[in-house]
Amino acid sequence: MPHPDLGIWFVGAFGSVASTTALGLAALQRSLVATTGLVTATPELAALPLPKFDRFVVGGHDIRAGSMEQSVRELHERANVLNEGLIKQCSDVLAQWDRNVRPGTVYRCGQAIEQLVDRGDLKEARTPLVLVEQIADDILEFRSDHGLDHVIVVNLASTEPPVDSEQLPKHWDELEQALAKGTASLPASCLYALAAIRTHSSYINFTPSAGISLAALRELADREGILYAGQDGKTGETLLKTVLAPLFKHRNLRVLSWVGHNIFGNRDGLVLDDPRHKASKVRTKDRVLGDILGYTPQTLVTIEYIESLADWKTAWDHVHFEGFLGTKMVLQFTWQGCDSLLAAPLVLDLVRLTAFEWQRGGRGLQRHLASFFKRPLGVECHDFFEQWQLLIEYARRAGEQSRCGPDGVTHSRHVHEN
Amino acid sequence: MPHPDLGIWFVGAFGSVASTTALGLAALQRSLVATTGLVTATPELAALPLPKFDRFVVGGHDIRAGSMEQSVRELHERANVLNEGLIKQCSDVLAQWDRNVRPGTVYRCGQAIEQLVDRGDLKEARTPLVLVEQIADDILEFRSDHGLDHVIVVNLASTEPPVDSEQLPKHWDELEQALAKGTASLPASCLYALAAIRTHSSYINFTPSAGISLAALRELADREGILYAGQDGKTGETLLKTVLAPLFKHRNLRVLSWVGHNIFGNRDGLVLDDPRHKASKVRTKDRVLGDILGYTPQTLVTIEYIESLADWKTAWDHVHFEGFLGTKMVLQFTWQGCDSLLAAPLVLDLVRLTAFEWQRGGRGLQRHLASFFKRPLGVECHDFFEQWQLLIEYARRAGEQSRCGPDGVTHSRHVHEN
Amino acid sequence: MPHPDLGIWFVGAFGSVASTTALGLAALQRSLVATTGLVTATPELAALPLPKFDRFVVGGHDIRAGSMEQSVRELHERANVLNEGLIKQCSDVLAQWDRNVRPGTVYRCGQAIEQLVDRGDLKEARTPLVLVEQIADDILEFRSDHGLDHVIVVNLASTEPPVDSEQLPKHWDELEQALAKGTASLPASCLYALAAIRTHSSYINFTPSAGISLAALRELADREGILYAGQDGKTGETLLKTVLAPLFKHRNLRVLSWVGHNIFGNRDGLVLDDPRHKASKVRTKDRVLGDILGYTPQTLVTIEYIESLADWKTAWDHVHFEGFLGTKMVLQFTWQGCDSLLAAPLVLDLVRLTAFEWQRGGRGLQRHLASFFKRPLGVECHDFFEQWQLLIEYARRAGEQSRCGPDGVTHSRHVHEN
Amino acid sequence: MPHPDLGIWFVGAFGSVASTTALGLAALQRSLVATTGLVTATPELAALPLPKFDRFVVGGHDIRAGSMEQSVRELHERANVLNEGLIKQCSDVLAQWDRNVRPGTVYRCGQAIEQLVDRGDLKEARTPLVLVEQIADDILEFRSDHGLDHVIVVNLASTEPPVDSEQLPKHWDELEQALAKGTASLPASCLYALAAIRTHSSYINFTPSAGISLAALRELADREGILYAGQDGKTGETLLKTVLAPLFKHRNLRVLSWVGHNIFGNRDGLVLDDPRHKASKVRTKDRVLGDILGYTPQTLVTIEYIESLADWKTAWDHVHFEGFLGTKMVLQFTWQGCDSLLAAPLVLDLVRLTAFEWQRGGRGLQRHLASFFKRPLGVECHDFFEQWQLLIEYARRAGEQSRCGPDGVTHSRHVHEN
C-alpha cells in the first residue's frame, strides 16, 4: 500500500456519517466491500483517473468524546445495519484515525448543539478569528504529521440555526474587521470554512449550515483559489422530489400540493427537533419544488425526531396533482433509507472528485457537483437529471483532457505518484 | 372556426380513452378547459407551430354499439371524474363525431375481446386482406366526406394476445402472399395498421397489441413513406419506473427486486384479466427495468381487474435496493391515477406532433416520440429523461427550421391555411 | 308522511358536517339513498324501535351567512363527492330547514373562528348568561313553531382553543355567580350546552370543544336530567388507532413509536391550522394509545391544512413495534376518507339513539355511545371493540325491555304516535 | 433447573419457524430475552399456572439435513434479525435438541417440497400406515429417552397442495381400510397427525396443510381423547384483515373490494411459488372476509416469492369501501413483518396452552385457541376480537378452577412436580 498523500478532515468526525464514511473508506482500502452506493463507481465516472481509496487518511474535529468505532457500533446496534465482522476487520484503521481527531468548537452553534458537548477541552477564544487560527493549526499539524499534499475539509456536523446573511458585510475585508471588532459574528461552521481557506484546503459542506456560503467567505475562497462545493447532501426524500418533480413538469401535470413528512431518530434528528435548527433544514428541503416546477404549489415539510427509528430516515410524501380536464390524482411514496449509509458514499464521492479536480488545477466553486446537494451553491437548477448532466459533461471533458497525454496535464498541480 | 382539415381515426372509438380524448378535444376547441396534462402545452413544445385543436375532426371503428357521450358518461358515473356541465357543453360535437364511427373487426383478437361484441354488423371477410380493404374504405370515405388533407389512425382498442412474430415472414411481399394463401394470419390491430398504410394515413399504436410493429409491416410503411409511432402509452406505473430507475442507476444503488401490483376496473382491465391478453401488457411493463439498470433484478408485475376501481388505476410498487456496505433499503409508492384522463392528453399530443411532422414532410418512424411509450419502436432507451431529451432536441431543430422563413418550409407538404 | 315531532338543532348548521347530515336525512326521508354508513342500520341496532327518519326536522345556529344547499354544493365541487341529482332532489327540504337557522355567537371562540364571520347580526350580550338566554330562546321558538316534543342539540361548530378547566369552579352555583360577576368566562360551545340544558334539550358534542364536559355543567345537566354524550366524533385516523392498538396489546407486540400525520383542506382544517385550536384536537387524538396499551410509546400527531384536499382527510400512520427476540417491524397505513361523509351518518346515529333513549326515559350521560367518540365522556376505555360491546349490550337490554309489552314502556316519556 | 417433563415435537424442525421457536425457548429458559410477542405473557393469560419454559425439551422430524443453529444463522444473515450474541449463548442447547431430530417423509407432499430434500435417509414404506408407525416410533423414543410425561406435536412443515377431502371416507375405520388397501391416500401432514394420535400426543397444526382436519382423523382424535388445534397460524396480513374487517362491519361501511398482495423470500415462499401449494394458502387467507362481513366483496390475494426479502413478509392491502351517500373511500396498509419471529412466540403460546389444558385433563378440539389461526378448526368466527373473547373467557374459567384448591384439580392428569 502506498503512503497516503491526501487528507480528509471531518468536522464532526465522531458523528454517524463521518464514522460510517471512515469505516467504508477503510473497508474499500482493504477490498472488503463492493462499491455499491458510490457514484464514482458508475461507468460514467469510473473511467476518470480518480484518486484511489488508499491515498486517503482521515482526521477531524468533534465536540464530543468518543471514537469512530464506538459510533459505528452504536449505529450497528440501534439501526441493525453493518455487521460485526466488518467493524472488527476495520477497527485498527479507525483507531489510528481516531488519534487524528481534535476537540472542536460550538461557537454560536445554538443550544441544541451545545447540549451535546460531553468533554471539557473544546476550543474557546476571545474572538472568532482566534478560533479560526486554532482550527487551522489542527489542520496544518495533520497535514504535516502525515506528509500530505492536500487536505479536504468536509462539514458533517449537526445543523446550526440559520444565519441572517443580510446583516453581514458582503466583502471579506469588511467582515474580517467586524469580526475583529466584535460587531459581527459567525457560527462555528463558518469558522471551519475560514480555517479551510486559511490552510488552502478544499472545502465541502454536506450540511445545511452556512459554512462557506456567505458572500464574504465565497469572495475570500475565490480570491485564494480554494476549491469548494455545497450544500446539504441530497440523500433521501429531497432527492426523490428532484427526480419526480421534473416528471410532473414535463407531463404538464399540475402539482396542487406536496406534503413530505420525515421521521428519524439519530443525533441529527435530536438537534433538528429544536425549531431553530429545523428551520435551516426545512428551508432547503422546501424550495426545490418551486424552482423545478416554475410555480409554487402548497408545500409542507416536517422533520421529527422519533427515537426508535434510529438512523432509519422514513419519509411519507403525498403529491396531489391535477391532470387533464381538472382530474385530481395522487402519488404517494414512503422511503425507508438508512441516513448514514446513504450519505457516506456521497461523501467519499465528493472527496474523490474534489481531490481529482484539485490535481487538475481546478479552483473555486465546483458547479458540476450540484447533483449531490439539496441546495447547490451557485446552481439554480434542482432537477436531478439536469444536475446529472452537469456531472456527466464534466466527466467527459475531464476524461478527454486526462487522455491527451503529457500536455493534457501540464497545468495540473503536483500529483503524488503511487 | 376554420374548416377542419385533419382527421383522427380511433380504432376503439367508443372506448374510454378515445371518448375522453374526443371530449377533451371538443372542450379545447371551445376553450372550455385548460391544457393541463398536454405535453404539447409545455413551454418546450408550445413554441412549435403545432396544428391548433380546431383543425381536427374525429371518426373511427368500434366493435361495440354505443357512443362517445355514453362512454364519457359511464366514466363520469363509475369513476367520479369529469363533470356534468362539461359533458353537456360538448355533447353536440361528440354526437357529430359518433356519426363517423363504423363497425370494426375482431379478426383474431382473442376470445376476451370477442366477448365484448354487442352488435351484429362487424366486418367479416374471406381473407384478412379483404378486411384491410374494407377498413381502408371507411378511412377514405371519412377523408373525402370531410374534405380532409390527412388522417391519423390511432389504435386505442383493447389489448390482443401476443403475436408470435418469429413465425411470420419478415418481408411484406412474402407476408402478403401468405395472407392471401391463408398460410399466415394477423390479428385485427395489424389489419388496421395495414389499412392506415394503404390509405397513406399516419399511424400511432397506443396499445401493446402488435399493430405496425411487425418487421414486414414496418418495411411496407417505410417504403410507402408512412409516419408512425408506438407502442403502448406510458401513463402510470411504468412511467414512474422509467423515472425512478435512472435514479437508482446514477446513484449506484443496486435494485434487488422491484414488485409492481396494478389494480383497476375498466373494460381494458376486463380484457387483461384474460391471461393471454395480459401477457402482452406485462411483457412491455416488465422489460424497462433491465434496460435502464443494465442488470436484471427480480421483478414481478401483476395487473388485476378490480371492478369497483373503475378507471382508477392503482399501483403499489415495492423497490428493495442495496446501498453502501450492503445495507438494504426500501422505496414504496402508490399511484392513484385515472387511466383515461392520463392517456387522453397524450393521444392529443401524439396526434398533434404527428400532424406537425407530416406537414413538415416527415416520414417513417418517429423516434422522438419515445417518451410517450412503454415500448418505443426503434428506440432501446427507456430512461424517461433521455427520451425527453430526444423530444426536446427534436423541438429545437424543428423550431429553428420553422423559423427560417419561406425556405424553411418549402419542402413540407401542403398545409391547409386557416 | 307523519308530522315530525323531534328536532335536531345544529350548532354550526351551515358547516360541512351539519349540511351533509341534513342532506342525508332528507335523502333518507325520501328513500333516495341506502343506509350505508349508519351504525343504527347494522343488524345489532336495527332491531331496536329507533325513531324513523321522517320524525326529524332540522334547525340551528351559525356564525356565517350561507345555506345548507350552498354548503353541500361546495363540498360536491371541491371534494368531488355527492352528486348533482341527489342535491337537486333534496334542495326544497334543505331550503325549508335553512329557514330554521339563526345567527350564533363567537363569544370567546378564538381569533381563527372570529375571522370566519361574514354577517353582522351575530348575538352579543353584556354577560355570557344573557347569551345563553338568547340561544335558548331560539331553541324554544324552534320547538314551538314546529310543535316538537323534544330537541337534540348537536355541536358541530369549529374547534375552539382548549379551556383551562382547572381555573373554573367545579359547581354550577359558583360558576353561575362567577359568570354573572364576570370573574369567570366560558367559550361559546359551553353557552350552547347551557342553553340545551336550560331548554331541557338533549345535547351531543361531536367536536373537541369543551361543550358540556366541564364539571359544573355536567353537575347541572345531571341535576336537570338532561341526556348528553360526547366528545369529538371518532371518524378516521383515531378510529383506526383504537382498532389497531388492541391488536398490538393482545399479541404483546410492543409499540415503540406511533406517528400519525393528518392533512385536509376543509374549513375545520383552516381553523385547526391555528396552533391554539389545534391543541384541542391533537390532545384528544394523542391520548388514546397510552390508555389502550397500558404504557406510553413515543407518539406524534399532526393535523395540517392542505387546501387542495378539501374534505378528503388523508392520514399516514407509521407504527414501529417490537416483536419476539427484539425484532423491530413496521405497520403503515394511509387513510383517504371524506370527513363530512364519515361524520354525517354518525351524527344521525347519535341523534336517533339519543331520541330513543329520551323516549325510554333515560337521563344523564350516555356511556353506551363511547364508540362514537375520540374522548368519550365518563368512559376510560378507548378500545373500539370494548366500546362496541357497551353499545351492543345496551341494545340487547333495551331491545328486551321494548319487547316486554305495555309494562316495558310505561315509565317512558310520552312518545308521539305516527 | 428441573428435569424437563414436556416434549415439543416439530414437524419441520430445521425450518425457520421451528428453529426460531427453539432459539426463543432456549433464550427464555436462560432468561436472556423478554417475553415480548408471547400472548401467554399478557396479563390476561399470565395469571394462569402455565408450564414454565424450563419444562420443555425439543425434538422433531425434518426432510433436510441441517441444524437449528444453521437455520437461525441463515435467518440472521439473510433477514438481518436476531443477533450474534444471542445465537452463541444458545447454541449448546440447540445442538442438544438437534440430536433429537429424525429424518421425516415427503410422502405425497408435492414436487415443490420433494425438491427441497437433500438427504438420503428419508422414511419410505409400502403403505402410509407403515409410515405412521415409523413416525410414531420416533416420537415414542423421544418420550422415553427424555422421560417425558407428554409430547406436543406441532406441524411447521412447508405447505402441501390441498387434499380433496370429499373423495375420502368420513370415518376412520373406512379410511384405515382404504389406506391399507391402497385405494385412498393421505399426504405426509396427515400421517404425522395420525402418529400424534397413535402416541397419545397433543397435536397442533400451524400450517394450511390438511393435518388432523379431515373428518376421519378428527373422529379418531376425538375417540382417543387427543387434544388438538389448528390451522394455519395467523401472523400478519390475515391477522390485520380479521382486525379491520369488523370495523367496517360495525360502522356499516360497505367493502367494495379488498386486495392483498404478499411478497416474501423464505423457503416457505419458494414452496408457495408452486401454484398447487399456493392454492392451500390463498384459500385460507381469502375466506375470512366474507365470513366476517356477511357478504362477499371482490377479493384478491397473492403470495409471491421475492428472494431478496428473505423472511420479511411484506404485504400491501388496498381496501376500497363505500360510506354514506355512496361515497367511495380507501384504506391502504403495508405490513413489514418478519415471519418467523411473528410465528415463533405463537408456537410457544400454543404449546404452553395445550400443555396446560392437557394437565387439566382436557381432550378434543381446543376452540379457545381460534385467535391463533387463519382457519380455526371448528370455529366459524374469524373476527379477531370475538376470537380473543373465547380465549379470555377460557382463561377466566380455567383461572377460577385452578384457584379452587385441591378439588379444582382432582380430575386433571398427573402433573410433574417442579
Image (cartoon, coloured by chain):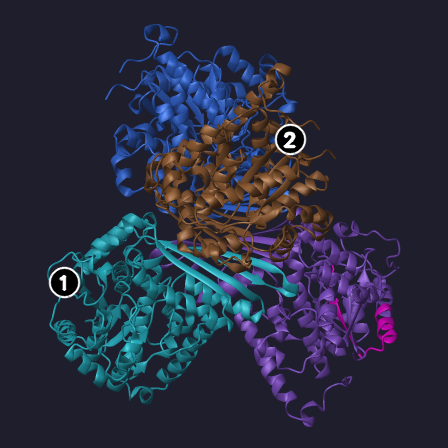
Chain colours: A brown, B blue, C cyan, D purple
Answer whether residue D151 is magenta in the image.
yes
Q: Which amino acid lies under the numbered mark 2 shown in the image of this protein?
A: Pro
**In the figure, residue A212 lies in which quadrant?**
top left
The residue located at (23%, 57%) in the rendering is C90
The residue located at (28%, 64%) in the rendering is C159
At mark 2, the secondary structure is loop
Q: Camera-side residue: D215 or D292?
A: D292
Q: Camera-side residue: D119 or D307?
A: D307
Q: Position of residue A5 (x, y in %)?
A: 66, 33
Q: Is residue C207 left or right of residue A52?
A: left
Q: Camera-side residue: D225 or C188?
A: C188
Specify whether residue A400 is in view.
yes
Specify whether residue B106 is in view.
no
**In the figure, residue D15 lies in which quadrant?**
bottom right
Q: Which amino acid lies under the numbered mark 1 shown in the image of this protein?
A: Arg
Q: Which residue position holds label 1? A: C99
Residues in magenta? D138-157
Neighbourhood count class around disc 2 (C-alpha, 10 Å): few under 14, some 14–19, many 20 upward? some
Answer whether residue A217 is magenta in the image.
no
Neighbourhood count class around disc 1 (C-alpha, 10 Å): few under 14, some 14–19, many 20 upward? few
Number of numbered labels in the structure image:
2
Q: Where is residue A411 in the image (x, y as percent from the top left)?
A: 57, 19
Distance, label 2 to label 1, CA atoms, is: 81 Å
Q: Which residue position holds label 2? A: A51
Q: Which of marks 2 and 1 is in front?
A: 2
Subunit under mark 1: C
Q: In this view, does C61 lie to the left or right of D42?
A: left
Q: Dividing the image into 4 quarters, which one contains the C terminus of chain B?
A: top left
Position of residue D202 relative to residue D266, above or below, is below
Q: Camera-side residue: B32 or D254?
A: B32
Do callouts 2 and 1 mark residues in contact (Cβ within 8 Å)?
no
